[in-house]
Image (spheres, rainbow, N blue to C red):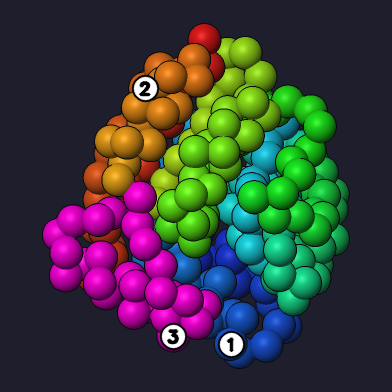
Amino acid sequence: MRARELVGLASGLYQGRGPGLRLRQVHRPWICPFELIVPHVPVGATVLDAGCGSGLLLGLLAALGRRIEGTGFELSPAALGEARLVAARVWGSGSRLEFGPGDVTGEWPDREFDVVCLVDVLHHVSVADRTEVLRRACAAVKPGGALIYKDMACRPRWRAVANQLHDLVLAREWVRHAEVAQVVRQVVEFGFRLEYRVDTTRLWYAHELRVLRRG
């Protein structure tokens, strides 16, 4: 699987949407390494995407035939509306997607999932709330299930600043990146073990992906 294939699938998911949305979502696989995330989601899994945005990750999993039961929650009403259109578009793919309103610092779904995804979320969360968000994410993982954590790297500093400028323009927010080693330590304290790690770059963006298994 390559980014080009995912860009093609994303184009189908957001076909007919506005040019701004298509620019952000269709081309996001060139920036975000979704092809490294997908293999860690088993076929037929129940998946929670916290802070799901416009539903791209779950939509890609459905379009790839993973036959997931996907749940996403998102704070932005506009993004949530787009995610629900993605859910309707993948109807008949063998996957069932459901999106609803929610904030990662608020209430989480009252159930456990095979896979919980926290992708490009934590750098938008205040430092004071990060431990609690990680605790809730871990609590939502079934025993034997996986937490997929992907976020932007703090180093090298110039790449981190480039991402901060990106979010300042698109999200109108000056973000603060989390130290991935500290995130892993906290998740391990919640009863997980590190199973997979990779650091990668796309254009001027630096990414840190960690998969941690519960139990």
Q: Mark 3 falls on what kind of element?
A: helix
Q: Is residue 116 left or right of residue 206?
A: right
Q: Quadrant of residue 149?
A: top left
Vertical comparison of 181 with 171: above or below: above
Q: Residue at x 25, y 65 (%)?
A: 160
Q: Quadrant of residue 70?
A: top right
Q: Can you tell which mark lies on residue 194? A: 2
Q: Amino acid at mark 2?
A: Leu
* Residue 172 visible in the displayed image: yes
Question: What kind of residue is marked 1?
Answer: Gly
Q: Which residue is mark 3?
A: 169
Q: Residue at x 66, y 19 (%)?
A: 142
The span from disc 1 to disc 3 (Cα, nearest Å) is 13 Å
Q: State the mark number for residue 20.
A: 1
Q: Earlier in the sequence, mark 2 or mark 1?
A: 1
Residue 153 picture location, percent across and down: 28, 54
Check residue 4 in the rendering and tell me which mark sits there, or answer none. Answer: none
In space, the residues marked 2 and 3 are separated at their CA atoms by 34 Å
At numbered mark 2, what does the secondary structure look like: helix, strand or loop? strand
Depicted 168 relative to depicted 118: above or below: below
Residue kind at label 3, given as amino acid type: Val
